[in-house]
Every structure is written in C-alpha cells, then in structure tokens.
Image (tube, rainbow, N blue to C red):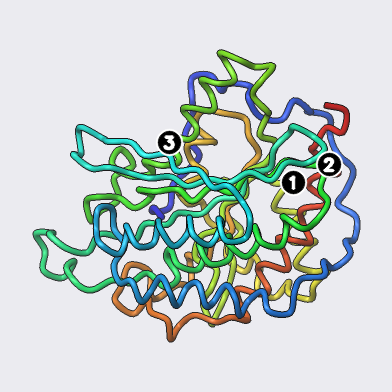
Amino acid sequence: MGRRATVPTAAALLIFGCTCTDPKPAIPPMTKAKAPLDLGFRAYGHVQTLVNYGPRHVGSKGWKQAIDFIMGELTDMGLEPRRDEWFNGKEQLSFTNISVTLKGTSKDKIVIGCHHDTKKCVGHHDPAHNFRFVGANDSGSGVGLLIELARILKNVEHVATYEFVFFDGEESLPWDWDKKRALFGSKRYVRHYVQARFDEPENTPIIQAFILIDMVGAKDLQIDEETNSDKELRDIFYAAAKANGHEKYFYVDSLPVTDDHTPFLDDTKVRCINLIDFEDNPHWHKASDALEHISADSLHLVGEVVLTALPAIETRFIATTN
C-alpha cells in the first residue's frame, strides 16, 4: 500500500464503470447482516497460516506457499479459482493474480479485492530496511477476510456477480514508494478489463463497484475515510457500520491513499472504496506487523460491515434486467 496521494487526473476517463449518473436518494438505515459467528476466528486462522510462511514478497518461498494456500482454500470450498501468471521482463519477476467468480442473476459485477504480496524487506541499500517482515496485517488480514467472504457469499443468493481478486505486486519494489514499480497486479487487471470492454463490450460484464480490503485486522482498528474513494460508497459503508454498532471504528481520520484501487481511478469510472487502516498504524512496514497485533474481533467486524453493505450496493448500482 502506497503513500498519501491525490486522485490522478487522466486526460480522458474511459466509461467502463457505472452507466448511472442520476443522483441517488439518501442512504436509508440498513439491516445488520447475519454473519457466521466464526467469521473472524476463521479469517484469523488464515492470517496465522500466512504468517507462518514468513515473508511473502514476490518470488520468495513464502509467496509461492501463499499462492498455493489461497488456491487450495478456494478449491476446497467448491469454487474454481483462476491463476493469472505473467512475467515482467523489465523487473525480471513473475507475478500471479488469483481470482474467483460467483455468478449472480445479473452480469454486472462487484469486485472485492486485496493484495497477497508483502513488502520486500531484503536487498535494500539501507540496512534499516532489511528485516524479517511477515505482514500479518499488510497483507495477511485482507487475504484472510477475503477467503471467508467468498465462503459466505457462495451460499447466499445475490443479484450481482461477485469476483474476488487477490492481487500480486501491490508493494513498491524500491523501499520508497514508486507507483511505476508497484500495483503490478491491479494495473494488469484493469488493463485487461479496459481492453475487453473495448473489444467485446457485449460479452464483458461491467464492474459497477470495486471494494478494496487492505490492513483491516489491527487490534486497535480504525478504518480511515479514504478520500479518493467514491463518496456514495463511503456513505454506504458508514451506514453499514452504524447498523452493526461499529461506527466508532470508522472514519476518525480522513486521507487519500494510493493503493490497488488507483488503477481503477486512473483508467475507468468504476466506483471504488478502499477499506484501510493506515493513518493510525504504527506497525506499517515494520517488523512489528506480526500476529500479536491482529484481532479476530477486528476481522469479524469488518466482515460484518462488508456483508451489510453489499445488498445496498446491489440495490443502488446493479442492473436487474441483464
């Protein structure tokens, strides 16, 4: 996950996101979703597994183990995950995105994503940047929660087609943030989506919303109001948090962040929201980002909020006649 940044100004945004521009009515009160009681516990277990693999930067042993683990978990629940593997000649690195689709009654899609790589903390010139980094929160928490959301939603009737994407190469390869050498997986995903919408618009479902989950497991959780995110989606998620009695964990701080939603903002009109705990995060890119600072309760409450928000997103943004 990158530094603070403003929304990039594109010369022209491609209209591959929502086709509805009419103002929507105010967000009504929501009904709390019935999340499984073990949601947070199971997500925490996945984080524990990932942490036990150790560092998971691109090309490392732990990275390979994490990819196999994600694929195995999704397969074991009866889904058909897909690997998108590619080689970046400039970086001389291979990357792997993982995705799985749950079809709804509409072809319109809601994409829910996270990144599965961790910050590379070896091979830097400054010795202070070389240490064992297991990324319990960044990126373990997002991966753990996304796996469990897929498990829940595969058994729930839904209008939208859901796609879960585990992006690779989110972290900047140089220690200091360099957008040109980061966000590899989300850039690739967006590039393929834009090309498919151009080549075969009738056969390429429109992504009506993208929900990014990044660093959501801290014991002292505080989800920021990420200001590059769509205002309506921010309002929906706050209403969902309030419906669950979790509003105190949301939006104390407001700031813009560069993350895996940035390529969507750069090149599409897809509505995006980044659920992230960044501003008040003393363990970001430090050796202390370890399991002892992660809470199953935090993972559970974020999961509850996502599950509560999704029906409202479907109602407001997803076509029911395609």
Q: Are marks 1 and 2 in contact (CB under 8 Å)?
A: yes
Of tags 1 and 2, which is closer to the observer?
Answer: 2
Question: Distance between the Cα atoms at labels 3 and 2?
Answer: 27 Å
Numbered disc 2: secondary structure:
helix
> Which residue position holds label 3?
187
Q: Marks 2 and 3: in contact by CB < 8 Å?
A: no
Q: Earlier in the sequence, mark 3 or mark 2?
A: 3
- Disc 3 is placed on an element classified as helix
Amino acid carrying mark 2 in the image:
Arg
Residue 134, how many percent across, how many down? 33, 72
Query: Which is more N-terminal, label 2 or label 1?
Result: 1
Residue 316 - label: 2
Q: Determine the residue positioned at 63% across, 43% down.
A: 101
* Residue 272 visible at all: yes
Above or below, 132 relative to 82: below
Q: State the residue position of label 1.
A: 232
Q: Quadrant of residue 67?
A: bottom left
Alpha carbon separation for disc pair 1 and 2: 10 Å
* Depth order, front residue of 309/256: 309
Please tell me which residue is depicted at 23% across the width and 56% down the height of the picture: 175
